[in-house]
Image: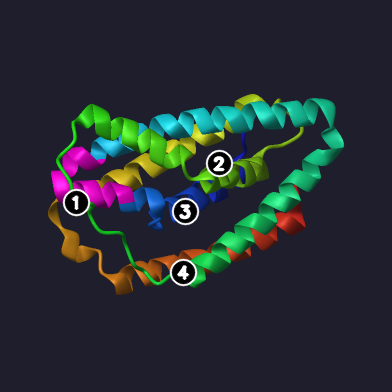
Amino acid sequence: MFSLATLIPYLGACALLAIVPGPTVTVILANSLRGGTLAGLSIIAGTQLGLVTMILVVALGLEAVMGFMAFAFDWIKLAGAAYLIWLGFNMLRSSGQLGQAAAGPAKSYRRLMVDGFLVIWSNPKALIFLGAFLPQFVTKEGAAFPQVVVLGLFFMLIAGVSDSLYAVVGGRMRSLLTQTRIRIVSRVSGAILMVGGVWLALVRKA
């Protein structure tokens, strides 16, 4: 379905995007700090479930667009590339700050899973991001739905591994996540993402 020339850059982009701390990572860290690694992993289980539903929404939407307005496909990819450039610019400006653990009684793991699901769906930027990022690697030669689903599953796998590492760090080694280190990672990733967005806008694969 995908060539190595497409898959390798995609997996690299997924890794870069997953490792940069965002709202989801902040929630994972906050709960890991308060309830331990398992609390953070429970949040991740909920966010992964949320990602499944978001990917299905993107897949169905893109399939519909390609079915009824195939001419709009290139414009969708171009708009998505522009969004990725804007996202990379914001990463360059990152302060490297992370949220603090919220006060309050400990929650059950089931409740934390629900919280994780709600956290990712309460952030519309997550859906916008998936809608901008995944179509960049979809081709017109095949049906959009299975391509988006497969790409989405790869993204979920990489994000799940990265988030799990944050949960472990939050539960055991908070000192490793210094503001300076996070700022460096964000800026390097932001610069690479901007370059990648420009490249995708210029290539605009058919």
Image quarter in which the C terminus is found: top right
Q: Where is residue 79 in the image (x, y as percent from the top left)?
A: 72, 52
Q: Circle 2 is placed at which residue position?
A: 127
Q: Circle 4 is placed at which residue position?
A: 188
The magenta-colored residue range is: 27-40
Between the residue at mark 4 and the residue at mark 3, the CA separation in whole angstroms equals 11 Å
Q: Where is residue 36 in the image (x, y as percent from the top left)?
A: 14, 44
Q: Is residue 119 left or right of residue 98?
A: right
Q: Mark 1 near mark 2, Cβ–Cβ under 8 Å? A: no
Residue that appears at 61% across and 35% down: 2
Residue that appears at 49% across and 52% down: 12
Q: Decide: is 153 above or below 28.
A: above
Q: Which of marks 1 and 3 is nearer the N terminus?
A: 3
Between the residue at mark 1 and the residue at mark 2, the CA separation in whole angstroms equals 29 Å
Which quarter of the picture shows residue 43?
top left
Q: Circle 3 is placed at which residue position?
A: 17
Q: Earlier in the sequence, mark 2 or mark 4?
A: 2
Q: Earlier in the sequence, mark 1 or mark 4?
A: 1
Q: Which of marks 4 and 3 is nearer the N terminus?
A: 3
Q: What residue type is labelled 3?
A: Leu
Q: Circle 1 is placed at which residue position?
A: 103
Q: Earlier in the sequence, mark 1 or mark 2?
A: 1
